[in-house]
Image (cartoon, grey):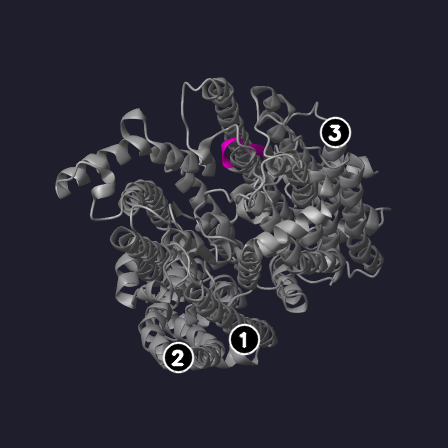
Amino acid sequence: MTLRIAKKEMTEMVRDGRFRAASAIVFTLLAGALLLGWQHFREVSAQHASAQRATREQWLGQGKKNPHSAAHYGVYAFKPKVPLTMLDRGTDPFTGVAVWLEAHKQNEFKYRPAQDATAVQRFGELTGATVLQLLVPLLIVLLSFTAFSGERELGTLRQLLSLGVRQLDLARGKALGVAVALGLLLVPAALIGVVAITAGSGQTDMVAAIPRMAWMTLGYLLYFGTFLGVSLAVSAWASSSRSALIILLGFWMFNALIAPRAASDIAKALRPAPSAFQFARGIEKALQGDGHDSASSRAKRLEQELMKKYNVDKVEALPINFTGARLQDGEDHGNEVFDQAYSRLWTVFDAQDGVRRLVSVTAPSIAVRSASMAFAGADFPQHAHFARAAEAYRRTIQRVMNDDLMRNASNTGVYVAGDELWKKVQPFEYTAPDASWVLSRQVPSLVVLALWCTAAGLAALWTTRRVRVY
Amino acid sequence: MLGTLMKYDWRNLSADRAPLTVALVLGTAIAYGAFNGSEWIRFQNRAISEALAEERERFDRIRSEIPRIEAGEMTVSAFADPRQPQSFGRSVGTRYAVMPPAPLGALAIGQSDLYPYYFRVSTSSKATFLNNDEVENPVHLLSGRFDLAFVLLYLYPLVILAFSYNLVSSEKESGTLALTLSQPVSLRRVVMAKVLLRAAFVAALAVLLSAAGVIIGGANLAAEGAWPRLLVWAAVTAAYGAFWFALAIAVNAMGRGSATNAMILAGGWLLFVIVIPSVLNVAIQAAYPVPSRVELIQAIRVAGDESTRQGSKLMARYLEDHPELAPPSNGPGGPPDFGTLQVAVNEATERSVQPVLAQFDAQLANQQKMVDRFRYLSPAIVAQSAFNDLAGSSAHRYKHFLAGVDEYHRQWRGFFVPRILKKEKLGAGDLDRLPVFTFREEPTADVTARAGVAFAGLLIPVLLAGIPAVMALRRYPVAG
């Protein structure tokens, strides 16, 4: 019975001109967004890869200079692009693309792509994710808001139920019909997406991408299921098609427009982040230290320690170069300061994410956006993961340079090093976190989506059982 | 006649609770949006005052340190010596160039959360201090802000459509339209009365509440140019609302049922507010892709390497170009020190990077021109650009600020470079002779002219939708 109802629904929908027009538009936008995403990914990925190679060549080709000068010259680290960002660019336009790894400073990432775009971009980018998160739910609403209210107004609901069709079968049949009609649209688009992602990534990337794609698909399916359930429930409960449509459009609008912004506002109000000035000033003050812990007093302390350790009474008699030791000590102190400041800031951002997760209990769109961004590899925690890896590499460079100074520089005269030292620093290698790392952080979002989907399904079944027949 | 129609329509409208709840929702959203905008202004002002306070503190400390260093009471490393012009200009005595929020900044947060509003200017190249981004969780930048512009661009049209989607069709469906028109009154007059009533209600709500919200939030109406901007902003809001009313009339005039009208208008809202802007964004980026910043980084590095390699050769060429800056012939000779070399190296690097930067700016300008031309495809884009301009949160104002910073950077360098080359030390009296940055707002005439063009651009769709609508009303199937 369910299948028969589903077949009838599907046939009716596919023959309906409105469905065909709407699906054609959504499919074109989706396919277009995927292709654009693929092209953008290919370009940017190639740029970042060649830039990473070039900065390594510049490092190796420095010629002969003092290791500390080389440390100041530094290298750049460019954020690698993950193939799934073809589908969802997430926060990538709003995080910098490159960071300068130099001595004494942990720099911020530079050049956010959004700063090079016009104000029109703030309306929203056309990516596969925005089409899936905004337009497909609207399509679901349009397909199913007349499921029960339309039949009631036409008079056919009374006839159906008088034939002995169970309300449960009716609800399931209608849901299945809409799902299959939507599948006609989404499955080809998903295939295009998979082909694009495969074409754009190497073998290792593909292996990493498959579990992420699977979890992302799950998230989206739960989201679509939520909208389907809510639409059927409202259609059965509302007194007319018109009010069903208005309620559902209101639900969509709340999810698409209001909830994300309201959640951000609530998160910022409850867990405010410092301003850029306060953040930089805090680091500056901690680096300068107070009189007790200033750079000069630290240097004197180090002098005493080293002289005692090597049992000499003059700095010049130390077996290691004191400048190198002092520089490394300064780096260690700086690293402590940076670690404290950045972990405090990133804890605030994590806390804000937590608040948004709480708010997502009222709006599943927040949960699906968070899950989609995370599995695509374009959310802030993964940016921070890269930032931490780049910073660890910076500290390695400093240590290698300072070690060399300590061991090989004499306490008099100018010391220069060459290629052999530059080569000692390995090239920067970064592996993105795997799907299970992301999953462990996104379990709450998926749970929220699953709860919404279940609740929507139960609501649909409950309202259908009590549907008003005329 | 119009007044009578309006009076009775108002009675009908107010008896139905739904429109009033919708109006209440709009009012709450406007109040919240104005509050958010004012909060952002307060945040910016706080950051600016903290920065300027830090500068004052630092200068007071330098003022007390210089005499003590000169007297030999305290020693300080060369890099931190405030008397050395290269250290002072590069790090010790750097000053802030600040762009305070515009008088009506609370109206629209726009792009102002993405662009820096203050810089710490030093003698080093601009690339070292221009990336002064505000700390913000990128997800918040992605979501956008719940400010007044958001409410007016997205929710205000929905309220208008909710009020007027069944302007004529509801009366037709309930049968009262035929009765009304059996009186000596034309359909056009009835529709006009209804629209005027709703327009007055909604537009008044939007404009008055927003203005009140912004003023309560602390906008400085006494500032120069505040009133003209407020008036143009009210005009743009009214014109934007007029477009949606015209669209609603046009859809009603097609003669379909209320439910169909609702769907068509929802589709129209979706098209103009969501689909066209994202498609236009894609088209702009395809037509004028901005060159890669990654390549810019490479270009700057390569240019810097080249200049450093050339080193003293550049110094000689620099002094040839600027003979007035050469140190006196009886002064200290010998190889140029770090400070003087930096001057020449910086200048050479910037000269070779200039074409790359110019290419960037050219592409961005092309993008902006394309937006300016094609924004008329959607009234939402036109209204957004007008709101951003009037609130001072647009790229125009930021570019204006950057031009001022550029000029100030030149002045700053112009103060220090001669002293570096002549190896002159700074004294306490020089602190008062330092160049100071003052931000001058764009002339109000420019801003209101740009917004005025947007206003005119909004009137065209109003006419395009409204005129055929009013004509189609003549052939409206009143009964049956």
Say whether disc 2 or disc 1 marks the residue closer to the N-terminus.
Answer: 1
Q: Residues within 10 Å of mark 3 (few under 14, many from 20)?
A: some
Please determine if labels 2 and 1 lie on a single subunit.
Answer: yes
Query: Quick check: can you spot residue A177?
Result: yes
Q: Tell me the kind of residue under disc 2.
A: Gly
Secondary element type, mark 2: loop
Q: Chain of mark 3?
A: B
Q: Tell me the kind of residue under disc 1.
A: Leu
Residue at x 31% of width, y 65% of height = A424
The residue positioned farthest toward the front in the image shown: B330
Q: Chain of mark 2?
A: A
Residue at x 61% of width, y 64% of height = B291
- Front tag of 2 and 1: 2
Image quadrant in which you'd find residue B130: top right
In the picture of the structure, the residue carrying the numbered disc 1 is A35
Judging depth in this view, the residue of A61 and A155 nearest the camera is A61
In the picture of the structure, the residue carrying the numbered disc 2 is A202
Residue range of the region highlighted in magenta in the rendering: B91-96
Measure how far apart labels 2 and 1 are at the Cα level: 18 Å
Relative vertical location of residue A147 with respect to residue B409 in this rendering, above or below = below
The x, y position of residue B293, in whole percent, is 56, 60
The x, y position of residue A186, in whole percent, is 46, 76
Secondary element type, mark 1: helix
Q: Is residue B146 left or right of residue A327?
A: right
